[in-house]
Image (cartoon, coloured by chain):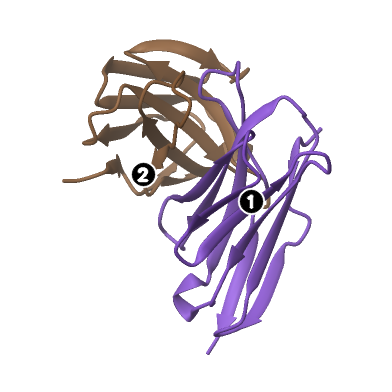
Chain colours: A brown, B purple
Amino acid sequence: ETGVTQTPRHLVMGMTNKKSLKCEQHLGHNAMYWYKQSAKKPLELMFVYNFKEQTENNSVPSRFSPECPNSSHLFLHLHTLQPEDSALYLCASSQEPGQVYNEQFFGPGTRLTVL
Amino acid sequence: DQQVKQNSPSLSVQEGRISILNCDYTNSMFDYFLWYKKYPAEGPTFLISISSIKDKNEDGRFTVFLNKSAKHLSLHIVPSQPGDSAVYFCAARLGTSYGKLTFGQGTILTVHP
C-alpha cells in the first residue's frame, strides 16, 4: 500500500448506529487531518493531529470522536449522527504542520450517508 | 465568512489552449497558497504551491501567480490537455495556524479534445 488509504470507501448508517472510519498513511508523515466535504461547500478542516496529539478541533460536534493511536493511523468514531452529516470525509497527512512548505496528501475519502 | 473564494464554478477550454483558474482571498495574513486537483472518486492531489514571498512559481505546464496587493492568485495550465479535466481547489494557510488550510469551493475544468 502506498500513500494515504481510507476504509470503508462508502458507508450507510442509521442515526442510532455507531461506526468508525479508518485512515492509514504510508508516507512517514507526522501529522494527520480529518476534513469534511459537503455538497457544494469547500473542504472543512475538522481535526489536526501532530505526533499523535490533537492540535486542532475546528468546533466539531462531539458525535464525531477522533482517535490517533500512532502517527500512521487515524480513526473517526461516529455515533448518533444526523442526516446533515452525510458528506465525503477525507483524511490527509503531511510532515510537521509547522514546516514552511507543508503539502498535505489526501486519501480517496469515505462517502458517508446517514439515513 | 468565506476567506478563500473561487468565483467561477466551472471553466471549459479547448485542448492545447490556456486554462486560467482564479482564486481570491480576504486574509492578508495568509502566507502560503496551494492548488489541488481532484478527480471523481479520488482524494485531492497536490499540484503546485507558492509562498507569499514570491509572485510566481512554475512546474512544467503549471504556473501559479500571486498578486498580494489584489489578494488574488491564479493557476495557468499551458497547454491544456483532456486529462486535466478535474475539479481544482485553491487553499491558503495562515503562518500561525499550524497546518490548517482554508479551501475554496473548487472550479470544474473541462478540456475538450
- Cα–Cα span, label 2 and label 1: 18 Å
> Which callout, 2 or 1, points to the residue nearer the camera?
2
Q: Are marks 2 and 1 on the same chain?
A: yes
Whether residue A70 is situated above or below residue A29 in the rendered picture: above
Q: Secondary structure at mark 2?
A: loop
Disc 1 marks a residue whose amino acid type is: Ala
Q: Secondary structure at mark 1?
A: loop
In-front residue for pair A43/A83? A43
Residue placed furthest toward the left: A1
Q: Is residue B90 visible?
A: yes
Q: Position of residue B83 (x, y in %)?
A: 44, 75
Disc 2 marks a residue whose amino acid type is: Gly
Q: Residue at x 56, y 42 (%)?
A: B50
The residue wearing badge 1 is A39
In-front residue for pair B101/A111? B101
Residue A104 quadrant: top left
Q: Residue at x 52, y 66 (%)?
A: B86
The disc placed on residue B91 is none
Whether residue A59 is situated above or below residue B91 in the rendered picture: above
The disc placed on residue A107 is 2
Q: Position of residue A90 (x, y in %)?
A: 45, 40
Question: Is disc 1 surrounded by few (<14), some (14 to 19) or many (20+) residues within 10 Å?
Answer: few
Q: Position of residue A36 (x, y in %)?
A: 54, 37
Whether residue B42 is situated above or below residue B16 in the rendered picture: above
Which chain is mark 1 on? A
